[in-house]
Amino acid sequence: MVCPRCILALENGLEVINCNFNEVKLGFVNINRSFPILKIQEMLLSLGFELITTHDQRLVGSIKTKLIELLQVNENLRSEKLSVWLSNELSKDYHYLSNLFSDTEGKTIERYFIKLRVEKVKEFLVYNELNLKEIAFKLGFSSVAHLSAQFKKETGFTTTHFKKLGLNKRLFIDEL
């Protein structure tokens, strides 16, 4: 689950199958009684989700959740290195996290985070609320040039061209 709508969909799904739960938040569900896991797994699949069962899957999910939360809050994007922040957040060695993520996802944590930030840039461009300098600062890019280079690398468009075309070609987070 990567957004409030995902959480709402999961809560509704749990209610439909009569599964009592205490809490649903990003990447986590606390079910308050024994319930057939197969029934939960079927419901998740019907909603386009999957059940994360292994420790490694949970840790990769936690990495993604933390990065998404960081981007939504827009704090600490410039104050400390991503590797240090993530290592502190998850109380794990960054090299371990990085190797696990790369092996599981086929891309580095840094590349995944750049993709997340580019999607956020698209959002800001579509809504036309901030200029490029403000977007670059807000999302922790070192400059407008850096933002533009990453945007072009990920989308094939310049930010100006993307904005002029009025494209709303945003990706779902699970497609990154």
Image (cartoon, rainbow, N blue to C red):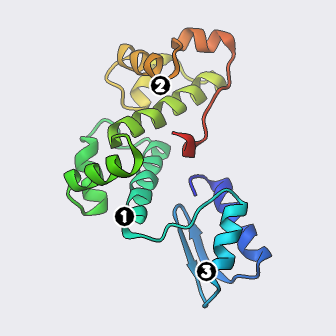
The quarter of the picture where residue 56 lies is bottom left
Q: Position of residue 54 (x, y in %)?
A: 42, 70
For disc 2, the neighbor class at 10 Å (few under 14, some 14 to 19, many from 20) is: many
Q: Amino acid at mark 2?
A: Ile
Q: Position of residue 121 (x, y in %)?
A: 52, 27
Say whether disc 1 or disc 2 marks the residue closer to the N-terminus: 1
Residue bearing mark 1: 56
Between circles 3 and 2, the one closer to the viewer is 3
For disc 1, the neighbor class at 10 Å (few under 14, some 14 to 19, many from 20) is: some
Decide if residue 20 is on the left or right side of residue 112. right
Q: Residue furthest bottom?
A: 34
Q: CA distance from mark 3 to mark 2?
A: 43 Å
> Quick one: 36 or 114, which is closer to the camera?
36
Q: Position of residue 89 (x, y in %)?
A: 31, 58
Q: Residue at x 56, y 67 (%)?
A: 51
Residue 93's disc number: none
